[in-house]
Amino acid sequence: MNYVDEIISVLKKNGFADRYLLYSQVEDAKMADITKTIVYLQQKKIIRVEGHRKNSRTGLSIPIYSLASEHSSHNTTHRGIDRLDLDELLAGVLSERVVEYGFLARNLLPSRSHMKILDVGAERSALTKALSKCGSNKKWEVFGIDIAKGIQRAFKEEKEEPGHLFMRMDARFMGFRDEVFDKIICISTVEHIGVQSSHYIVGKNDGLGDVKALSEIFRILKKGGRVVLTIPYIDGSTGGNHKEHRIYNSQTLSKLISRFRVKRKEFYIYIEGKWKSCKLKNIVNKLQLIGNSEIPSYLHSRVCLCLLLEK
């Protein structure tokens, strides 16, 4: 890494710094270089997350780093037991997860002991594992399902790390009894269900795959239970789809979540290289100002909608 020594030097001098302060004090570095170096230093346990500050423009939580100390009794992993450890999940991530996981963490509460939680679309398993760690002292039962074959590998890993269970399962036809889960999480997943893509081989396209999945989620959710759902969104008057996933508008969204009560709704727009909180009434104007400028290929849409639903 080109900037390891420089970042360590800044932290020795200041004691604490977020990525923006590091960027401003490391000469000739791009923000991407700073982010990659931070990830490397975290993996090597040379630096740790000491706290967070709120970005006044975006409203997002930003990690504050310090040098790790062998004599310190504090540790990011142990602190993460009482909260969802976003710093580990989001290290080096630039996609919608930046806002989706923050929304999820804020809406896990109020939580209680002996909850059953389902993560729909858990192929990579990192979120499911983080949830089980977060709820380890509350005796949460955390389940992860995915239609992808990779879930079988996650199941083998799970045997060495109790607290969560992975299963290969189609979200349109879930093998759970009625009203069994307290909370269900569906992060950037429902837009793919039933859609043929390079990542998901589903046979014949199922135009109602997402609606079927939400119907199943409603069925297996306890009365009063809640769903954290995140989806790509676009102006309600225009609609639109990507060839490998759906992009929702006001009409398709209404059909998707018609059986639920909406408890919370937050919109985020990707603009000037960052995710920013945005009110629905302002999205059209902002999109018009941006015009037809391309967005990075790893994003589903320029607008991400985060929903808290209740049965």
Image: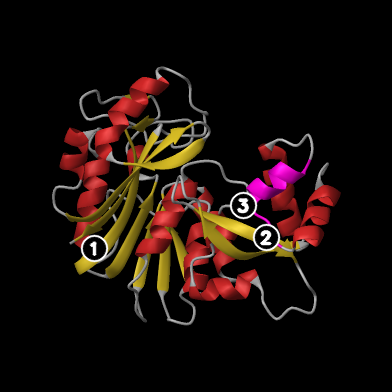
Instruction: Locate residue 128, reporting x and y percent.
Output: 48, 62
Left of 138 or right of it: where is 174? Answer: left
Res. 157 mark: none
Image height of 84 relative to 61, above or below: below
Left of 159 or right of it: where is 46? Answer: right
Q: Examine the image and state in which quarter residue 261 appears.
A: bottom left
Mark 1 or 3, which is nearer the eye?
A: 3
Say whether disc 1 or disc 2 marks the residue closer to the N-terminus: 2
| Residue picked out by circle 3 | 91
Res. 65 mark: 2
Give the residue at x 27% y 42%: 210
Structural distance between the alpha carbons of marks 1 and 3:
33 Å
Identify the secondary structure beneath mark 1: helix
Image height of 286 relative to 278, above or below: above
Image height of 130 relative to 295, above or below: below
Q: Is any atom of residue 144 visible in this view?
A: yes
How dense is the environment of label 2, judged by Cα within 10 Å: few (below 14), some, or many (20 and up)? Answer: many
Structural distance between the alpha carbons of marks 1 and 2:
41 Å
Res. 220 mark: 1
Q: Is any atom of residue 178 visible in this view?
A: no
Mark 1 or 2, which is nearer the eye?
A: 2
- Amino acid tagged 2: Tyr
Instruction: Locate residue 278, reporting x and y percent.
Output: 34, 40
Identify the secondary structure beneath mark 2: strand
Give the residue at x 28% y 48%: 172
The C terminus lies in quadrant: bottom left
Main secondary structure of the magenta stretch: helix
- Amino acid tagged 1: Ile
Span highlighted in magenta in the image: 16-26
Instruction: Please check the rendered image and state whether residue 71 is part of the magenta-colored stretch, yes or no.
Output: no
- Amino acid tagged 3: Ala
Residue occupying the far right of the picture: 5
